[in-house]
Structure formats: structure tokens, C-alpha cells
């Protein structure tokens, strides 16, 4: 996991524990004041929210406990593609450039330019260097790229 990914998870965990959980607890308390809990839709909805919230808290805590956080900025640049680097690829057919950061599964967001280390593109470029040409096996067919730049951001 990258440092930024770990920070995003910690921020979400903090928001869940300090803001969302107290709001849900208050909603449950308010619903209990309305009387019979068996037919109280507000109470059941609040309990369901509580269940989802607690599940997400446990999931994030587990991920953070098991994660190995890698600060790619602390690794000396070698021009080689490794986990956490930001890579500029030139599509050899269309001459279009794309920029991706190689991140962990939980951090991946293609629209934000972050691809999972397990994605076909990431697997094809891992360990390669600037100037190398690679072929990515995509559902629409093979796509040829050249690695233009590798940055440790």
C-alpha cells in the first residue's frame, strides 16, 4: 500500500469512528424513544447502518494492520517500474500518452490514474525501464506501449 492510500484509509477510519458512529448511536437512541421496537422502521434502519459502519471499521483496521506501507519517494529512482511509481506510457498506435501510478488493490481508481499492481497493464510494465516497449493483452486486442517516464512521486 502506498503512503497516500494508507492516509486515505486512516482518514476514513477516523471519520467513521468520530462522526458516523456517534450519529448512528444517537439515531438508535432517538428511535428507541418512539416505543415498540418490533415495528419501528427507524430503529431497524439505524441498526442496519450501525452494522455496516462497524463492519467497515473492522475491515479498514484489518487492512491497515496487515498492510506494508511503501513510501516510493524514499526509494532512489532507477528508471525501473516498481510498486508506487508513476509511469507515463505512449500508445504506439495512437501516439496518445497516459499516466498511471501503480498502487495496491484497495487504492486502485482508473479515473484518478491509479491502477492496481495486479492489473494487466501493471503486470506488463513491472520491472521494465524507460524506453522499453511492452505489449498489453487487453480484451479488445493487444496494445503496444513505450515507457516514456518513470517517476517516484
Image (tube, helix red, strand yellow):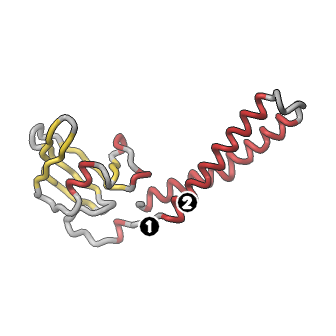
Query: Picture coordinates of residue 111 (x, y %)?
Result: 35, 40
- The residue tagged 1 is 68
Name the spot of residue 119 as percent of width and height, x first: 29, 49
The answer to whether residue 59 is left or right of residue 53 is left
Neighbor class of circle 2 (other Cα within 10 Å; few <14, some 14-19, many 20+) is few
Spatial CA span between label 2 and label 1:
12 Å
**Extreme front residue here?**
38
Name the image quarter holding the N terminus: bottom left
- Location of residue 61 (image quadrant): bottom right
Q: Earlier in the sequence, mark 2 or mark 1?
A: 2
Residue placed at 13% from the left, 52% from the top? 134
Residue 76 percent across, percent down from the top left: 28, 72
Which residue in the protein does label 2 denote? 62
Q: Using the image as rendered, state which of residue 46 and residue 9 is in the foreground.
A: 46
Residue at the spot x=33%, y=46% of the render?
Answer: 113
The count of marks equals 2
- Residue at 11% x, 57% y is 132
Q: In which quarter of the image is residue 37?
A: top right
Q: Is residue 62 left or right of residue 70?
A: right
- Give SS at disc 1: loop
Q: Is residue 31 left or right of residue 142?
A: right
Instruction: Give the foreground label among 2 and 1.
Output: 2
Using residue 49 as the reference point, say whether residue 63 is left or right of it: left
User: Label 1 near label 2: C-beta < 8 Å?
Assistant: no
Kindly state the secondary structure of the residue where label 2 is placed.
Answer: helix
Q: Percent position (x, y) of residue 29? A: 83, 40
- For image coordinates 34% across by 65% down, the residue present is 72
Examine the rendered structure and indicate whether residue 118 appears above or below residue 38. below
The answer to whether residue 26 is above or below residue 60 is above
Amino acid at each position: 500500500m502506498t503512503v497516500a492510500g494508507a492516509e486515505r484509509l486512516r482518514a476514513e477510519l477516523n471519520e467513521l469512528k468520530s462522526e458516523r458512529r456517534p450519529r448512528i448511536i444517537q439515531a438508535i437512541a432517538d428511535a428507541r424513544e418512539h416505543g415498540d421496537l418490533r415495528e419501528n422502521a427507524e430503529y431497524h434502519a439505524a441498526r442496519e447502518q450501525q452494522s455496516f459502519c462497524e463492519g467497515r471499521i473492522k475491515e479498514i483496521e484489518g487492512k491497515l494492520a496487515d498492510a506494508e506501507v511503501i513510501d516510493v519517494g524514499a526509494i532512489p529512482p532507477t528508471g525501473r517500474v516498481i510498486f508506487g511509481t508513476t509511469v507515463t506510457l505512449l500508445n504506439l498506435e495512437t501516439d496518445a500518452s497516459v499516466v498511471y501510478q501503480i498502487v495496491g488493490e484497495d487504492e486502485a481508481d482508473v479515473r484518478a490514474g491509479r491502477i492496481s499492481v495486479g492489473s494487466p497493464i501493471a503486470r506488463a510494465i513491472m520491472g521494465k525501464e524507460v524506453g522499453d516497449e511492452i505489449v498489453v493483452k487487453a480484451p479488445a486486442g493487444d496494445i503496444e506501449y513505450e515507457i516514456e517516464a518513470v517517476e517516484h512521486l
